[in-house]
Amino acid sequence: MERPRRKHRILVLVGTRPEAIKLAPVVLALRGDPRVQVTVCLSGQHPVMAREALAGFGIAPDIELSLDPMAGSAGARFTELHRRICALLDRQPQHRIVVQGDTSTALAGAIAGFHAGVPVAHVEAGLRTGNLAGPWPEEGYRRMIAPIADLHFAPTERARQNLLAEGVDPGRVHLTGNTVVDALLATRARIADNPATARRLEGWRQQITGGRPIVLVTLHRRESHGPILAGVAAAIRDLAADFGDHAFVLPVHPNPAVSGCVRSVLADLPNVSLLDPLGYEDFVYVISAASMIITDSGGVQEEAPTFGVPMLVVRNESERGEAISAGFAQLTGTDPDRIRAAGRHILGHDAKAGLRGKANPFGDGTAAVRIARLLTARFDAGTGLEAAAEPVVVGSDASSLAIPRFVQ
């Protein structure tokens, strides 16, 4: 009698809401393969927001870790994450770990995988600003993951070239597109297919904006906390005063270093709405309706081009230069005068109209399928696990992948 095949065990680590959003399409694509046993683990970094984001895609975590609430510093939180993920791998051995981006969870998971001898796949690999201080600590974290990972899923050609320039084996770097586009398109379709949801969102928009054009603002970067953030908020205040016919919508980050500053500068303007953090569905709807976005977020730089929305990136460096090169974004830095000048130009010239029809530089919405195919590219007929073999090619845009033998 034929021996039952063992399933390929893949651990997908999720720490923050952006990780949940970008990994949800990968989880769904992998769960379509009967040879794979996917375990979704919430690391405990941002448990509530990550859990809610996964739920929007119909995914419930299989495992939820918890962090010591006294682990306050970035280093202490990282140490706690690493300890708990190592313990998980001791209890439940895996054949592969998937991490995303540049968070504490991603680096802790990669190092835990290295210690356990479990191969690591890095989704959204190769983003770089070239400045370890900006964004901090993300730039350092993603650089440290690169030598550990054996599969690098680069969202753009620029990211792929960054990895090659650092000496990463070209056979392990694969151009896939960014999974955030997959998530956005799925969410937009879900809204369009549900009339009740569409009515709720439109009613909420009317209540918040009174039908006025929207300027969406998101601010949270650690390196801007303090006087820099106050200067950015002052520039936004001036723009709101100049464009009273626009509604400035700002979901306020819960970090007191952000919320205290933002509220003290912007709370009394009649056309500024300071909101609690939005659910992903609501946030996608606001992005799609916006006339302009002012942001220091990395993810928003990838999301706005899907809807052709012009952006001001209020940072000194960006690892998403593709949005700038394609004309969707301007890198203003944090100088209030530059922010004011650029904002006045966009709002005074209907810049959104000029972006209609431009292609999204971050992909076509099929990145997760490419990633799932690469992760399951070759299985041994007897065990169902990836086997040592000749390099294989998956897809026209994928490089050859020399697949290692996994721990049995």
Image (cartoon, rainbow, N blue to C red):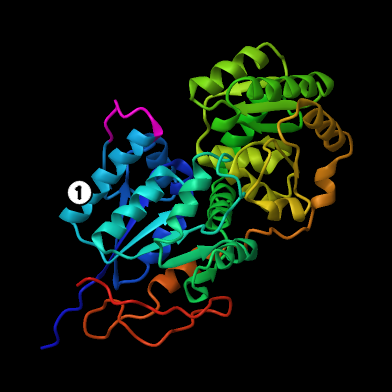
Would residue 101 be seen by someone viewing this image from the given angle?
Answer: no
Task: Give the crowd class for mark 1: few <14, some 14-19, many >=20 residues within 10 Å.
Answer: few
Image quarter hosting the N terminus: bottom left
**In-front residue for pair 285/388:** 388
* Residue identified by numbered label 1: 87
Query: Majority secondary structure of the magenta segment?
Result: loop
Q: Which residues are magenta?
A: 67-74
Which residue is outermost to the left?
Answer: 1
Q: Is residue 47 magenta?
A: no
User: Taking 394 as reference, is 331 left or right?
Assistant: right
Query: What residue is rendered at 59% in x and 36% in y?
Result: 201
Number of numbered discs overlaid on the protein picture:
1
Query: What is the secondary structure assignment of the residue under circle 1?
Result: helix
Picture coordinates of residue 332, whole percent (x, y): 75, 37
User: Taking 333 as reference, is 377 left or right?
Assistant: left
Q: Is residue 144 above or below residue 249?
A: below
Query: What residue is rendered at 56% in x and 58% in y?
Result: 178
Query: What residue is rendered at 40% in x and 41% in y?
Result: 50
Q: Quadrant of residue 56?
A: top left
Picture coordinates of residue 41, whole percent (x, y): 31, 49
Query: What residue is rendered at 58% in x and 45% in y?
Result: 299
**In-front residue for pair 242/195:** 242
Task: Residue type at mark 1: give it.
Answer: Ala
Picture coordinates of residue 5, whole percent (x, y): 20, 78
Q: Is residue 70 magenta?
A: yes
Would residue 119 be seen by someone viewing this image from the given angle?
Answer: yes
**In-front residue for pair 324/212:** 324
Picture coordinates of residue 109, whole percent (x, y): 34, 52
User: Taking 51 as reference, is 126 left or right?
Assistant: right
Q: Is residue 251 above or below residue 400?
A: above
Q: Is residue 277 above or below residue 154?
A: above
**In-front residue for pair 367/204:** 367
